[in-house]
Image (tube, rainbow, N blue to C red):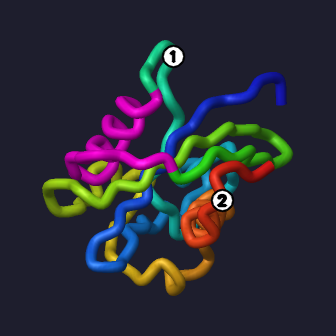
Amino acid sequence: MSYVRAGVEVPLLNNRKALPGRRHGNQKKAEPLLKEKGTSALPERKTNPHEDIKESAKRELKEETGIEAGNLELVSMTNDKVPDAHFVTTRFLCKEFGGEPEAREPEQIVEWDWFPPDNLPEPVSPPSSKSIKNYKDREVHEH
């Protein structure tokens, strides 16, 4: 691992339910760096160079799910590390949004659906598990 990447994640809450997507079962399509094939994951991706972090979060949410984000609230910043990758992930909670979720990148996420945050389909990606925990514990930074 030669550098750290910046990432964003946008947990959505609607009637006390979160919106995870099911990652593709093929590792090369799912998320090759984090090795998370077949996991449930909240909307997340890498930021582009020189991009504002909140704008990146809104863009990624729209690209992945078709949902237009309203106001974003900082939830946490974490270090997400695996043997081949290191991301510093900024997480924003989104309670105000427009549109219905759709799998706009089916080569990576095959479907989106609403679930209670404590009952996401297993296995849950480690970064998304951190998001849920940070939100419930009101813990803004986790090492």
Tag 2: amino acid: Glu
Position of the N terminus, as image quadrant, is top right
Q: Is residue 24 above or below residue 142?
A: below
**Sequence order check: which comes first, mark 1 or mark 2?**
1
Where is residue 49 drawn, in percent x and y? 51, 16
| Residue appearing at x 73%, y 28% in the figure | 4
Q: Percent x, y for residue 98?
A: 15, 55
Residue 139: assigned label:
2
> Can you say whether 38 is above or below 61 in the image?
below
Please give the label number shown on residue 9.
none
Residue 38 in the image: state x and y as whole percent.
56, 68
Tell me: 68 left or right of 141. Answer: left
Q: Is residue 94 left or right of residue 124?
A: left
Crowding at mark 2 (Cα within 10 Å: few <14, some 14-19, many 20+): some
Residue in the foreground of this view, choosing between 56 and 45: 56
In which quarter of the view is residue 2 placed? top right
The secondary structure type at the circle numbered 1 is loop
Q: Which residue is mark 1?
A: 49
Magenta stretch: includes residue 65 = yes
The image quadrant that residue 99 belongs to is bottom left
Q: What segment carries the magenta color?
A: 53-74
Q: How many numbered discs, if any?
A: 2
Question: Residue 43, how many percent across, how many down?
Answer: 43, 54
Residue at the spot 62% in from the left edge and 76% down from the top edge: 123
Q: Amino acid at mark 1?
A: Pro
